[in-house]
């Protein structure tokens, strides 16, 4: 579905990119440790720059593409993503940022101001200085915005691209269980008949490494709760993508409306917050939680961030993780704000009336 809003914004975008001063190589950057939404949006924007405006464009990211689902999506999409450590920044004249904003600490632009920003998170102060922006906090996915721009330019998505964009919208909105718009749903409905459903199944149900189950085991062992808040803390991680994944999973616990997970990677503590409260502002809460020591953001029902633990509170990351969890409980004003272990002992065996343990079915 192509909205009038997008038609108008695309015309401004087209004039901007067609300028002589916009010639030269473009670098399209995702946020660090990119998720499906940022990967699809970056691939779509790079296609738009190349096909509609004949600009050279490279897609790049920082951090790790860690989750098995995200790795499989990159394979399905067939997009060439370069890690920033392999790039010579002097080769690029222009920069675009998708699903992120400048000076938020979650991308590799650092203090460099991009030429273009596409995002669906609340606008930051520095973003207002960017030459062209399309920030839509009412959209559930940045990929939806970029897909509409491709439609405005007259470019259809290939079968692989349709599959990737479809999964981006599904994953970002949790199958439309959180923060989505009518354009998100319209894009999903439009792409479903075009998508490769077998490839989509491979993305959604990838083979998982043993480390995933180790992390899951640790997360369950460390569950703590107070009131409607549940938290868990992970130790050293191979990749930080598991942190938001565990936070999403914990939010499904009966009786809980807030979840927080943290984990340690590369000298940082990564933190994810989730809530079922549609009126909440998890992004602002995350920034309040981390303060000046870290970087974070998000929007209503989900947020992420990190904090350097070296040199902080005795350089004990575990102590800092517990401090952050306890601080969140205090900010949320839980009456008894002391977090207590949730799984005190293993569950008892379920027995039938004859006293034998239940068995049975598949």
Image (tube, grey):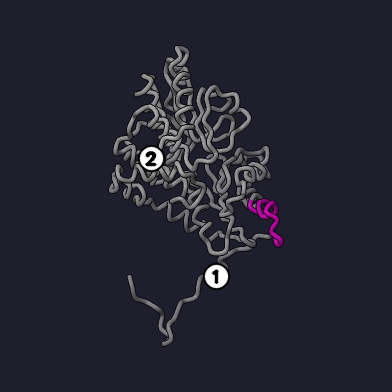
Q: Going by the image, does 229 lie left or right of 89?
A: right
- Disc assigned to residue 255: none
Element class at badge 1: loop
Vertical comparison of 185 with 10: above or below? below
The quadrant of the image that shows the N terminus is: top left
Decide: few, some or many residues near mark 1? Use Cα within 10 Å; few <14, some 14-19, many ≥20. few
Q: Which residue is mark 1?
A: 345
Q: Position of residue 279 (x, y in %)?
A: 61, 50
Q: Position of residue 188 (x, y in %)?
A: 39, 44
Residue under the image location 42 percent in, 47 percent down: 170
Determine if the magenta segment contains residue 328.
Answer: yes
Decide: few, some or many residues near mark 2? Use Cα within 10 Å; few <14, some 14-19, many ≥20. many
Residue under the image location 53 percent in, 61 percent down: 253
Is residue 64 visible in the rendered image? The answer is no
| N-term-proximal mark, 2 vs 1 | 2
Residue under the image location 32 percent in, 33 percent down: 156
Residue under the image location 39 percent in, 32 percent down: 43
Determine if the magenta segment contains residue 230.
Answer: no
Count the marks. 2
Q: Quadrant of residue 42?
A: top left
Q: Position of residue 140 (x, y in %)?
A: 49, 43
Q: Which residue is mark 2?
A: 165
Q: Going by the image, does 229 lie left or right of 205?
A: right
- Whether residues under marks 2 and 1 lie with C-beta atoms below 8 angstroms apart, the answer is no
Q: Which residues are magenta?
A: 325-337
Q: Position of residue 246 (x, y in %)?
A: 50, 53
């Amino acid at each position: 579905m192509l909205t009038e809003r997008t038609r108008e914004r695309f015309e401004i975008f087209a004039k901007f990119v067609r300028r002589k001063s916009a010639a030269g190589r473009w670098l399209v950057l995702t946020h660090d440790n990119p998720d499906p939404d940022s990967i699809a949006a970056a691939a779509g924007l790079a296609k738009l720059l190349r096909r509609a405006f004949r600009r050279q464009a490279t897609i790049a990211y920082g951090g790790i593409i860690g989750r098995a689902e995200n790795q499989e999506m990159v394979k399905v999409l067939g997009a060439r993503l370069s890690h920033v450590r392999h790039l010579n920044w002097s080769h690029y004249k222009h920069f675009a940022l998708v699903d992120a904003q400048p000076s938020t600490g979650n991308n590799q632009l650092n203090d460099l101001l991009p030429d273009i920003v596409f995002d669906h998170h609340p606008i930051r102060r520095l973003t207002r200085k960017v030459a062209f922006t399309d920030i839509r906090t009412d959209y559930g996915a940045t990929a939806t915005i970029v897909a509409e721009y491709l439609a405005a330019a007259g470019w259809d998505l290939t079968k692989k691209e349709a599959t990737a964009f479809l999964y981006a919208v599904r994953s970002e909105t949790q199958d439309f269980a959180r923060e989505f718009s009518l354009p998100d749903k319209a894009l999903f409905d439009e792409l479903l008949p075009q998508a490769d459903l077998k490839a989509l199944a491979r993305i959604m149900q990838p083979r998982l490494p043993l480390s995933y189950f180790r992390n899951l085991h640790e997360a369950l062992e460390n569950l703590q709760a107070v009131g409607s808040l549940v938290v868990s803390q992970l130790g050293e991680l191979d990749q930080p993508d598991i942190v938001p994944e565990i936070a999403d999973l914990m939010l499904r616990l009966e009786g809980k409306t807030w979840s927080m997970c943290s984990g340690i990677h590369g000298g940082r503590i990564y933190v994810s917050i989730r809530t079922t409260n549609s009126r909440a502002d998890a992004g602002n809460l995350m920034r309040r939680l981390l303060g000046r020591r870290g970087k974070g953001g998000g929007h209503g029902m989900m947020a992420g961030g990190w904090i350097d633990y070296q040199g902080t509170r005795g350089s004990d990351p575990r102590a800092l993780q517990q401090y952050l969890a306890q601080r969140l409980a205090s900010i949320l004003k839980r009456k008894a704000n002391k977090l207590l272990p949730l799984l005190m002992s293993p569950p008892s065996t379920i027995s039938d009336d004859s006293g034998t343990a239940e068995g049975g079915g598949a």
